[in-house]
Amino acid sequence: MQQIRTRWLLSAVASLLLAGPAHSKIMISEVLYDAPNNDTTEEFVELYNDSCTAVSLSGYSLTDNGATFNLSGTIAGNGYFVVAKSSAALQSLFGKAAQQSGMTLSLGNSGDYVKLKQGTTELDMVAFENAVSGWSIEGIDKSIERKSLTDTNSVNDWRVTTKGNPTTGPLSVTCGGSGGGTGGDTGTVNLPTYYVNTSGKTGAVLKAQLNSILRGHVRFTYAQVWDAISYTDEDPSNTDNVILLYAGRSQAKTFRAGTSTSQDAWNREHVWAKSHGFPDEAQYAHTDLHHLRPEDVSLNSTRGNKDFDIGGSTIAEAPLNKTDTDSFEPRDSVKGDVARMLFYMDTRYEGGDETGTPDLSIPNIAPTGSTAPQMGKLCTLVAWHKADPVDAFEQRRNNRIYELQKNRNPFIDNPQWVAAIYGASCP
């Protein structure tokens, strides 16, 4: 058994059925009520999940002395979740992304409180500037934050920050490994139990069993993918950065399309091109984290919706990659990663699904056509899988996706299944 520790926060769908009971350890961890520039846009409330399990915030709310704001999304285990008036204002002030924006509370500068509720049950409360007797703390132009996990339900649990620390802070629980909130390397799963009834199976029978296991996972909106892959593809050496799939460079999480017009900003690359079967965000495959990776805008455009195969000309901005008119060859160190992502997609969406994703398949041809629900080239991908084995980054990414999306890539956990399923087609 292994466990995931989460630090980076992300929004997730309300359909994640992990809504904890009233005793779930969700608490208010930071509040900016008297903002340095503009209270109407810069105020935020941060939550912390003092457990090792992700919790849906459906049914939770924040209230002050004048309004109630309903929460949505999912707070990761050992993770922070920022609810902001304006996502753009938070980004401008702190360089951080909010997990939920549009907060309608107007926190009073001369005394107010914030309560966290699940249904009608009050889970936590913080007050300031004597809105509640004994709560005299004042944060002028800076936030107030919870000092530790010790909760005495008093002002003594809180302190004034130097400015504000949304998405980070002093709170952390040990969820396995070396502890702390900066790792997040492994996921809580018993693999033999997860891959139930796969022993001794091969070929189409094994693939069908894996298909039944992989279905029913958490579904994200396309906007929520930004923060999701900021976590899954986080640079192990710099937690403020992500690793770009094809370019291979480490780049700031905040330097992304939508916040910058630079062609070097990173975008959300569909490794299985979305035009090949699932152009609609409502389709599960469109936002399936297993094949969504950070890549810079220009290189993402160069790849386009091309199939994967060997050959072509070196790409000037990323010379370890090649392309021609109808195919793309990634750098050697991620060829296996690309192959295993496509094998996952072919297996997970075999036969289609209830959201309109069609039956995806990997033929041994390239090109497959611009809109066909296919990606090639099968035997090239099998060769790449053999040449570029699973590495630690890929394993960590699979584990982090399992924490968030609640399903796994079986070809990372069991690389031998590539031969068991596809070997007969590519001897």
Image (cartoon, rainbow, N blue to C red):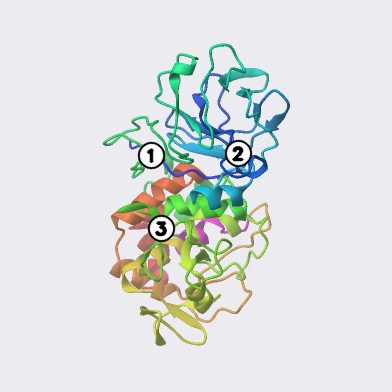
Residue at disc 3, secondary structure? strand
Q: Which SS type dominates the magenta stretch?
A: helix
Q: Which quadrant is the N terminus positioned in?
A: top left
Q: Looking at the image, tell me whether mark 3 or mark 1 is earlier in sequence order.
A: 1
- Say if the magenta span includes residue 278: no
Quarter where residue 197 is shown = top left
The answer to whether the residue labelled 3 contacts the one labelled 1, judged by CB atoms less than 8 Å apart, is: no
**Viewer-proximal residue, 320 or 188?**
320
Specify the label residue 242 is tagged with.
3
Give the residues in magenta: 342-352
- The crowd level at tag 1 (other Cα within 10 Å; few <14, some 14-19, many 20+) is many
Query: Circle 1 sits on which residue?
Result: 4
Q: Earlier in the sequence, mark 2 or mark 3?
A: 2
In the structure shown, which secondary structural element does the residue marked by tag 2 occupy? loop
Judge from the rendering whether residue 51 lies leftward or rightward of residue 81; answer left or right. left
* Secondary structure of residue under mark 1: loop
**Distance of mark 2 from mark 3, alpha carbons?**
27 Å
- Give amino acid for label 1: Ile
Tell me, for residue 344, which label it has, or none.
none
Of the two numbered discs 2 and 1 on the same chain, state the one appearing first in sequence.
1
Q: Is residue 350 magenta?
A: yes
Q: Nearer the viewer, mark 2 or mark 1?
A: 2
Q: Which of the 4 image quadrants contains residue 157? A: top left
Q: Mark 2 touching mark 3, by CB under 8 A? A: no
Residue 284: % across, % down:
61, 54
Q: Position of residue 2 (x, y in %)?
A: 33, 37
In this view, the mark in front (2 or 3): 2
Residue at point 58%, 11% (across, down): 133
Question: Does residue 132 sit above or below 167 in this rendering?
Answer: above
